[in-house]
Amino acid sequence: MRASKKVRSQKSEVRNRKSKKKNQKSKPAEVHISGAEGLYGVSDIQKVVEKYTLRALNHPKGRADKIIITIENIKRKPKEISALPVATISCCTLDEGKNAAIKLLQSLGISKKAIDTAFELIGKGSMRGAAIITAEKSGRLEPDTERGVRASRFGVDRSALKTLSLRLSRHGINKDIVKEALILASKVASFRQVVAELCISDDPYYTTGYVASKRYGYLRITNIKHKRSKSGGRAFFVKEGINVKGMINYLERMPVIIKSVSLCRGTVPIDEILNFSYK
Ligand code: PML
Ligand code: MG
């Protein structure tokens, strides 16, 4: 599901007011409101369509005026993977949140230059999909840097979802936003040459983001952005010399399903995280 809304940008309004030509109307821009997807059995389709539609109509970014729902029959057998282990790093301020993300990414061998590029792009919030950034030289690899890449065709098996919901609920985080982001991040991290992902939500009222990697798992970071900020996005850090076509094909086309769930912890101090490696 992709939902969007037409808005007149303030910039173009100002330009039009100044313009000598009377009655000239600015062209409204289309703003992304909400995106969601999953792999489901036929019997779940009706329920899922209703859930996604309601979400697009009641989103904190505003009511969508265009909702596109695509239902596709996936014939290829999904690749089975495990969900990344989950933990939360609790930060009180924006600086603390950002520094925690930087510390984690640097300890994964990602250069400061690549990290700065990611924060800058995400801060602008103008990309529709994710940026692919090389971990050392900070090169941009997406063929279309405005569109970026969209991880797609991921889901969770019914019994794994039950286990996941139970484990997350012990820490008060059994929410769709957490589960959907974890499933996406687990697919992204399962590609061999992905080193890490940085995500900051574009939801203006959601200030928790994450750094995900095979080594440390899915690490939620609270207060990584200002409340009311609409900018957000994702960056995938990859090894230099990667086969980018193969990666995009995997992320966008290959069906992947979560079959098992890993450890779900609550709040963990960052130093404890840095002293333990899952891979
Ligand atoms: C999103 O807006 O969909 C991204 C949410 C990222 C963080 C989810 C979480 O709390 O774990
Ligand atoms: Mg979102």
Image (tube, helix red, strand yellow):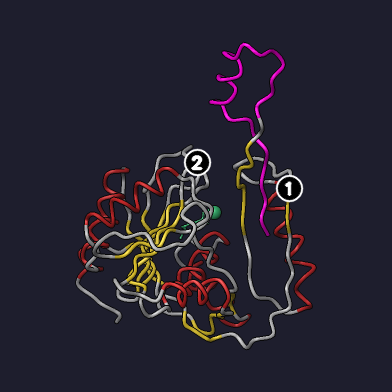
Residue at the image position 77 percent from the left and 60 percent from the top: 50
Q: Which mark is residue 162?
A: none
Image depth: mark 2 or mark 1 in front: 1
Q: Is residue 127 above or below residue 84?
A: above
Q: Is residue 2 magenta?
A: yes
Residue at the image position 77 percent from the left and 67 percent from the top: 47
Where does label 2 land, which residue? 230
Residue at the image position 64 percent from the left and 86 percent from the top: 76
Q: Residues within 10 Å of mark 1 (few under 14, many from 20)?
A: some
Query: Which residue range is magenta in the image?
Result: 1-26
Q: Is residue 94 left or right of residue 233?
A: left
Label 1 element class: strand
Q: Nearer the viewer, residue 173 or 114?
A: 114
Q: Is residue 28 above or below residue 257?
A: above
Q: Is residue 209 left or right of residue 139?
A: right
C-alpha span from label 2 to label 1:
19 Å
Residue 262, position in %: x, y? 43, 79
Where does label 1 land, which residue? 66
The quarter of the image holding the N terminus is bottom right
Q: What amino acid does circle 1 point to? A: Lys
Residue 63, position in %: x, y? 69, 42
